Image (cartoon, rainbow, N blue to C red):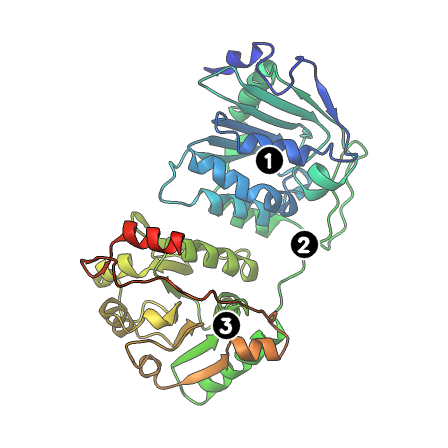
Amino acid sequence: MGDAGMEDAPGNGPFADGKPILLDGFGDRHLYLEILRWLINPDIDRIDLAVSFIMKSGVDLIADHLEVALQRGARIRFLTTDYLSITDPDALTRLLDLADRPDLDESQLQLRVFHDPKVSFHPKAYLFRSTSSAIASGFVGSSNLSRSGIRSGVEWNLGVDQIGPLVESFERLWTDSRCASIDARWVAEYRIRRPPDSAPRTPPPEASIDVEPPLQPVNPWPVQNEALRALEETRIQGFRRGLVVMATGLGKTLLAAFDSNRPDFRRVLFIAHREEILRQSRDAFRRVRPDGRFGFFLGADKDPEADVVFASIQTLHRNLDSFESDRFDYVVVDEFHHAAAPTYRRVIERFHPKFLLGLTATPDRLDGADLLALCGNNLVFECDLVEGIRQERLSPFHYWGIKDVADYAPIPWRNGRFDPDKLAEAIETT
């Protein structure tokens, strides 16, 4: 329990007068705002949540702020239950995805489940504290981690700043022999034994359940359906490579997720040049494959055996010998306008998938490199910015230019560029 006693100093918590506050779900008195406030508080480095049920709608509301807390080094623990099979496996997968970062300690975000079919499990506690100061806050009441529980429903939660007993109770539950760690394998097994969302459930009278409609599967947009038909047709014609050009905002990554989600494409490789793109792409693929096994091949984080591997071009290029040429059935090369670079060419030449998809919004390179040749001279589908606006799939825009009247002649030219200070001075005083 270690630092549990630090929370009991009065006047150092969220409430100036040391008195509890009631969040009753009316107006802006929702638990959601308090959760966000404490997740982004730079002093908070210990966050514990014990809730009966975790729903994806609730995780989606706070996921970005959880990531902020993790990136500053906070340790976060979730304790829930499989009681009545209400907890959403997609929500647990979303949390596991947050923890799957090479820059995070493996113990920074932990999930455990209380399992005892004979014992109901109904705590709802959100605890925030600092190990370096007396700052602490706790909220206990009726809210499970769902949209209705923390944001839209009428729920009563009491906020206090003396949370020592709450932390001690959390620790007792966390170490209880009936609790087990939640990992990808546990979630996969839970999906199998959990009744379908449409199956009727009859909870005992004392059960308090956040009833949510099942999440609707994501469906392709019209422009994505057009591209999917073109991709299917090109494979029927015998092509094993193809380039798709779609303007930003038309859903290129989701297109790749839809097209690769087929029984004959069991092993998928998604290649990009930035970690941010890879993680955003993982989240897009998760919408199409909620139970898929995803992994990264990025820096020190290497999981080449996943169903879908999201790889940085740099890490992949350095480890090409680790892969057989037929390791993947489907390869996606994002931002394909970079593919003329030697590193990309070597990676593309290494793999021989059933199909390779190049994606780009900007196919024209200033150096004149022939990108289409790398895709078998096969332009499968194109919907650029102008066409997207014409079809009302993208919003029209207007822009204004400012006439440049600076005199560049007296500005010194050094090392292939204008002197930054002199340039700034000329522009600012023109």
* Closer to viewer: mark 1 or mark 3: 3
Q: CA distance from mark 2 to mark 1?
A: 32 Å
Q: Is residue 114 visible?
A: no
Decide which of 422, 288 is in the foreground and name it: 422
Identify the mark nearer the N-term, 1 or 3.
Answer: 1
Residue 247's label in the rendered image is 3
Q: Is residue 346 visible?
A: yes
* Closer to viewer: mark 3 or mark 2: 3
Q: Quadrant of residue 269?
A: bottom left
Q: Is residue 241 left or right of residue 41?
A: left
Indicate the position of residue 189 as horizontal and vertical percent values: 53, 48
Question: What residue is rendered at 41% in x and 53% in y?
Answer: 276
Question: What residue is rendered at 61% in x and 71% in y?
Answer: 221
What amino acid type is highlighted by mark number 1? Answer: Leu
Q: CA distance from mark 1 to mark 3?
A: 34 Å
Decide which of 74, 90 is in the foreground and name it: 74
Indicate the position of residue 270 as horizontal and vertical percent values: 39, 64
Q: Is residue 106 left or right of residue 283?
A: left
Q: Is residue 290 left or right of residue 109?
A: right
Name the secondary structure under disc 2. Answer: loop
Question: What residue is rendered at 66% in x and 13% in y?
Answer: 18
Label 3 Cα crowd, 10 Å radius (few <14 / some 14-19 / many 20+): many
Task: From this view, report whether residue 178 is shown above or below residue 297.
Answer: above
- Marks 3,2: beta carbons within 8 A: no
Indicate the position of residue 292 as horizontal and vertical percent values: 49, 57
Indicate the position of residue 129 as horizontal and vertical percent values: 53, 22
User: Disc 1 marks which residue?
Assistant: 36
User: Disc 2 marks which residue?
Assistant: 196
* Closer to viewer: mark 2 or mark 1: 1
Residue extending furthest toward the left: 415
